[in-house]
Image (spheres, grey):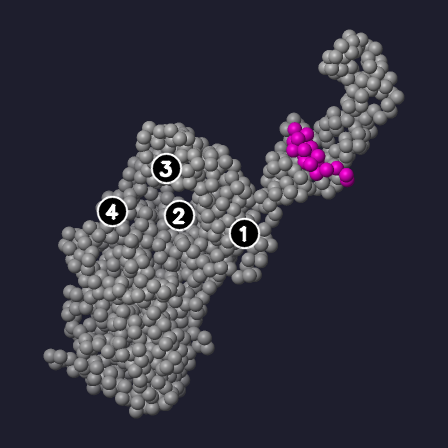
Amino acid sequence: MADITDLTVLEAHNAKMAGELSAQEHSEAWFEAAAGDDLNAYLWRNDRGAEAAAIEVQQDWNAPIAVKDIFTTEGVPTTAASRILEGYRPPYTATAVAKLIEAGLPILGKTNMDEFAMGSSNENSAYGPVLNPWDRERVPGGSSGGSAAVVAGGLAPWAIGTDTGGSIRQPAAFCGIVGLKPTYGAISRYGMIAFASSLDQCGPLTRTVSDAALLLAMLQGRDPLDSTSVGIEGGVSLPDRENLAGLRFGVPAELARDAVDASVREVFERTLEKIEALGGEVVEVSLPNAEHGISAYYVIAPAEASSNLARYDGVRYGMRAGGDGDLTEMYEKTRSEGFGAEVKRRIMLGTYALSSGYYEAYYGQAQKVRTRIAEDFKGAFSAVDFVVTPTAPSVPFKLGEKTDDPLAMYLNDFFTVPMSLAGIPAISIPAGLAEPEGGGPQLPVGFQIAAPAFAEQKLLDAAYALEQGIGFDARPEGVGGADG
Amino acid sequence: MAELEAVIGLEIHVQLATKTKMFCGCELSFGDEPNVHTCPICLAHPGVLPVPNEQAIRYALQIGLALECEIAPWSIFHRKNYFYPDSPKAYQISQYDIPICGAGRLGDVRIHRAHLEEDAAKTIHVGESGRIHGSAASLVDFNRGGTPLVEIVTEPDLRDAAEAAEWARLLRETVRQLGVSDVNMEEGSLRVDANVSVRPAGSSELGTKTELKNMNSFRFLQRGIEAELARQRALIESGGEVEQETLHFDPASGSLTSLRSKEEAHDYRYFPEPDLVPLAPTEEMLREAREALPELPAARIKRYESELGLSQDVSQTLATDPRTAGYFESTVEAADGVEPRVLANWVTGELAAALRQAEVEGGAADSRVSPPALATLVSMVQEKKISHGSAKTVLTAMVTDGGDPAEIVEREGLAQMSDSGELEAIVEKAMVDNPDAVEKIREGNGKAIGAIVGAVMRETKGRADGGEVNRIIREKL
Amino acid sequence: MIDRDQVLHVAKLSRLRLSEEEVERMVGELSGVLEHVDRIGNLDLEEVEPTSHVVALENVLRADEPWQSLPRDVALASAPEPSEGAFRVPSPQAE
């Protein structure tokens, strides 16, 4: 039923409270919609049979949700979009997912992603790329491309993904939806297949800021199984702000790049004007070390990844290569056949950065840059409430456009990586549409707002007010009741 | 060629006797079926995270305090990365440059550091010979994987194999008395590796060291080090150079086998463990650890030497085992007017001998001779109520049947002959019965007095005081 | 920037077997990334502490209380080669 799946989660909730909609109707509508996946967004869909028994809810009383295939789900295939975990069924469920199940959210399915969360376009999946519902010749962003595409494409009301250097925010921007990376430590990482331990965070991908708040409230909290988790003190409630009066928004001088597409720049400037129209103040701030974010990130993340991915060795689970070689051969063949090119690249980069003789110059130095970036943000936040940037330097690019140049792909993360390094929360909200060069459907552009650590409520409140002010209600053609 | 002195340091791994593993709640296993104590965490499934065992931290603090180590106010975990089937994460969580315990000392040996880490799993090699070389496959059992370990590293202060084995015994006993580990070398809860090198005597530079592993008893440790020292000395004396390598000692053949590891195996690419937060022992944790320490051998030995005036040898014999020490101290408490030194000599001397003679199992604390009984016996000798010889007889009786020495003396009629009149008469008779001996004494042959003393002793059934007999004889000469 | 020998060495450390073509490509790709990354080498960060932990927590510990281990058949369920209750792997090469 097209109408039911047009409702945001909050709207559906209100309808259920008003007796206009039953939880069961709601679920059924979404399970039916998910079955129409033509974006290659789902790697596994829940048929609510015996296989999914361990992750089934007691009672459907909340909105069904899509889960990035990086979260372990007991008894149900979990691949991290890699061949090396083909057929793997975990013996346990990730804490974040367990919390959702306990809250009565049926799991619609596991979404496609860049392999082991390494990528910005979802073209690194061993199971094929995900298509952007706005233009099927273009990428949905990554690594949470599948989660973003299902929400934007009417295949799920909301989803969870993970963000290490921008992997929730950038696909949210590319798909015209809301994506939030919370403060590092807000949500448990237990059961979230590790890419870069000191950067990975779970977060919501939703159609609205209110829905993101609802989901974050359910996910956040300290977990005894994750010693780096603290939760958000005071919890999270529905945002409620009418304007931006009294709030100061900082635009970092150093992050003004020529390489930002003209269309992106235009939407960004327009949004700054909207902020002022809503009573907010826009000022310039300085983040002197933020421009080195990519360099630091592409040392730290691969380094931690090279260690986190060493356990995929064919011994205890997952794929094991055939042949009767010795142990070393088994390791090498398994990992070479099981990992894709980008994963191998990052493992190599990371191993190199940690290796004898190079540690200080690379890993050591990168962690110092990180300290500086965190200090830069702290300094900025003494003068402003939020730091704002475009989420991505471009509109969604075409499939295959950037796959030949890893560095070009990495530079996509330019605006999102500094917040990850500093561990602070940041949200991307859709701010407008842009005409792509060479014609074609209009494409969404995202606006990023970053806040101090654990200031999620303030962030959501401001994002909500701005969202209402912008009034972005476009949807991809053919999705929902919108005109597209 | 200048004499070569040995320089030895030890690396000890202690398996902690906690209930659960270092980073997960699986129980520790003791010879159970393979893989019955595992979980997603110690099997390193995708997405799992470690959380440190609080008791392991406490035990590590106790070990550190017992070894007089500086306790780091802030320490962190590191990842040590390497591929092997017994290492499921392909990294071991350990501590690198900021360990929980720093410099310390035990006896004559300085401690360099002590830190926490997790144990590897067990790999059994199967195939033709059952040994790693020539085997077709390995079977991995993850029961042991993740067991908490404390690694203790000494400075290279040891100078010979026997000293090393002796010190290792002291370390074992010290840790055992803390109650934090079974420290059983045969079972693997105590593992001792040795770093061995030689250098010209008097030099302060260190020679190239080799690492000796796989010795699972103190005897083998000593023999292994001896063998390696001999090998290094022979090598240098013939003009060769010692190469850094790891060696296995085979006690059966006495041979040393080299494990010449490939170079890249040593690049562990250490970096701080991002999944764990730092350890900053609180005042309360330190206080509780300190309070949990019993009086340990090294401290007790010192106390016996300085406060009780005992010699180092006797102190070590008494103080190392807490039960023997307890027995001795009870004896001292029960005794009135007897020096601890005298009691100590009785415990380590006559009592020990009597127990051996009677083939009694265990030590003084297990015997039937109660501390008050021994104290009384020694007092009686001191007060000359019985002779030393008679006391030994009483002791033998007590070892077998227990009892009170005064009663036994009464019953057996062993009281020292104190009536000098009676004694004088016996001495006179002995002298009359042994005229040749008396003649010899008068001629200057002092030894001949023994014959008369012996006769007196026989007549008095040992109850006479030997010194007194001698005095009377000389008087009458 | 990074040469062929280094690539081969790092591949060995990572237990990756690269084809000749992959090795060549890696040399180029990794060099490109490292060239960009190397910028941070020029920054004066002498006085700066490296970030080793992101959250300001200490002493997050777990009580020494046992929990249920996995039944063995579950532990071995994902094993590529279970054997005699254990995980079977090829032996390391004889040295």
The residue pinned by badge 4 equals A329
Q: Which residues are magenta?
A: B336-353
Q: Is residue A50 left or right of residue A176?
A: right
Q: Earlier in the sequence, mark 1 or mark 3?
A: 1
Q: Chain of mark 1?
A: B
Q: Are marks 3 and 2 in contact (CB under 8 Å)?
A: no
Q: Which residue is mark 2?
A: B121
Q: Main secondary structure of the magenta part?
A: helix
Residue type indicated by callout 1: Leu
Task: Find numbered disc 1 in the image and state the secondary structure of the residue it sits on.
Answer: helix
Of the two numbered discs 1 and 2 on the same chain, state the one appearing first in sequence.
1
Task: Single out the mark in the foreground, 1 or 2.
Answer: 1
Subunit ID for the residue under disc 2: B
Q: Residue furthest top?
A: B436
Which residue position is annotated with label 1? B65
Q: Residue drawn 60% across and 54% down?
A: B291
